[in-house]
C-alpha cells in the first residue's frame, strides 16, 4: 500500500497492510533547526513516516508565528497591533480590536516555536455579543489546497480543520477566556457558556459552507482543552 492508501484505509476503519505511523504535525522550528530546513512532506519521507500534511492557510490561527492579523480585519472588526517586541525569540504583541459597539483587547507572547496568550480577549460577559455580531469569518480559497493535494499525491493525506483560533468550539472558547474561568462558568452561568459556544459554532458553520469541494482527506475539530485531562466528559 502507498502511505495514502494505508492511512485512508485506517480512517475508514478497515485493515491496512500495516499500522500507519505518523506525527500530528511538524513544527517549523524543528524543521529549521533539526531537519535542514526541509518542508513537512520531505521530513516525513526522510524519516520513513506516512505523511500527514496539515493545511493552515486561511484558517485564522493566532498562534502561528507568521500569522497575518490584518488579513482578517474588516471595517467592523479592526485588529490593530502594537509590537512591543519583534525579537523572534521574545515576540510580544498587544492587540486592540475596534468594533462599532465597543473595544476588545488581548495580548500574546511567543518565540520561534509557538505563541501563547498573556491576556484573554473576553473580560466581560457582554463581550460575547461583540464576537457574535462582528468577528469576521473568512472564505476558504480552494485553489491552493488543490496544489498541496497534488504535491502530496500518494505520499500521504492532506488534513484540514475548521476555521478559528482552534478548530472546536470549546477549544476556541478556551483561547478567548482562561479555561479555568470557562469551566467555572459551566456551573455558575451555563446559559452564558452556551451563548459563547453558540456564537462560535455559528461562525464555524459559515466557514464550513466555504469548504465544499476542498480536497481534504480529513477534517479536524475538537482540541486539547476538551480532553479528559482538562475537563470531565460529563461536563461537555
Image (cartoon, rainbow, N blue to C red):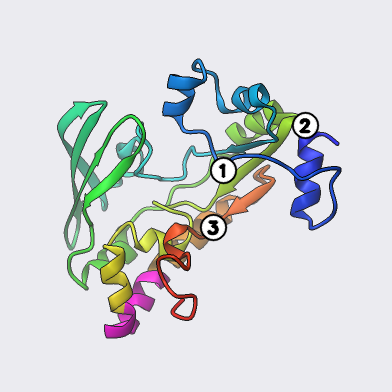
Between 21 and 176, the one nearer to me in the picture: 21
Q: CA distance from mark 1 to mark 2?
A: 18 Å
Identify the residue shown where x is 44% and y is 75%. 232
Q: With respect to residue 223, does 228 lie above or below?
A: below
Between 137 and 106, the one nearer to me in the picture: 106
Q: Name the secondary structure under disc 2.
A: helix
x and y, in percent, of residue 226 in the image: 45, 65
Q: With respect to residue 50, does 107 lie above or below?
A: below
Picture quadrant where residue 135 is located: bottom left
The label shown at residue 24 is 1
Image quarter where the N terminus lies is top right
Name the residue carrying label 2.
154
Q: Is residue 162 left or right of residue 180?
A: right
Label 3 Cα crowd, 10 Å radius (few <14 / some 14-19 / many 20+):
some
x and y, in percent, of residue 106 in the image: 20, 51
x and y, in percent, of residue 87 in the image: 21, 25
Q: Is residue 235 left or right of residue 147?
A: left
Of labels 1 and 2, earlier in sequence is: 1
Label 1 Cα crowd, 10 Å radius (few <14 / some 14-19 / many 20+):
few
Nearer the observer, disc 1 or disc 2? 1
Name the residue carrying label 3.
221
x and y, in percent, of residue 66 in the image: 36, 31
Asked whether the residues under the numbered discs 2 and 3 touch, taking CB atoms below 8 Å apart as contact, a structural biologist would say no
Identify the residue shown where x is 40% and y is 70%. 197
Asked whether the residues under the numbered discs 1 and 2 touch, taking CB atoms below 8 Å apart as contact, a structural biologist would say no
| Magenta region | 186-198
The label shown at residue 119 is none
Magenta stretch mostly in which secondary structure?
helix
Amino acid at each position: 500500500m502507498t502511505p495514502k492508501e494505508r492511512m485512508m484505509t485506517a480512517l475508514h476503519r478497515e485493515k491496512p497492510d500495516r499500522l500507519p505511523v505518523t506525527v500530528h504535525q511538524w513544527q517549523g522550528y524543528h524543521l529549521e533547526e533539526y531537519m535542514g530546513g526541509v518542508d513537512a512532506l520531505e521530513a516525513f519521507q526522510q524519516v520513513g513516516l506516512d505523511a500527514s500534511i496539515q493545511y493552515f492557510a486561511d484558517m485564522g490561527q493566532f498562534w502561528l508565528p507568521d500569522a497575518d492579523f490584518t488579513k482578517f480585519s474588516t471595517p467592523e472588526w479592526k485588529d490593530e497591533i502594537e509590537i512591543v517586541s519583534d525579537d523572534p525569540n521574545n515576540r510580544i504583541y498587544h492587540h486592540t480590536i475596534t468594533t462599532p459597539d465597543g473595544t476588545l483587547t488581548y495580548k500574546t507572547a511567543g518565540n520561534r516555536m509557538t505563541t501563547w496568550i498573556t491576556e484573554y480577549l473576553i473580560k466581560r460577559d457582554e463581550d460575547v455579543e461583540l464576537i457574535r455580531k462582528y468577528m469576521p469569518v473568512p472564505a476558504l480559497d480552494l485553489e491552493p489546497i488543490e496544489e498541496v493535494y497534488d504535491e502530496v499525491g500518494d505520499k500521504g493525506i492532506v488534513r484540514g480543520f475548521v476555521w478559528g483560533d482552534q478548530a472546536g468550539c470549546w477549544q476556541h472558547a478556551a483561547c478567548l477566556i482562561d479555561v479555568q474561568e470557562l469551566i467555572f462558568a459551566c456551573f455558575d452561568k451555563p446559559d452564558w457558556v452556551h451563548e459563547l459556544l453558540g456564537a462560535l459554532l455559528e461562525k464555524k458553520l459559515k466557514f464550513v459552507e466555504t469548504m465544499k469541494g476542498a480536497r481534504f482527506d480529513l477534517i479536524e475539530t475538537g482540541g486539547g482543552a476538551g480532553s479528559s485531562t482538562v475537563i470531565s466528559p460529563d461536563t461537555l
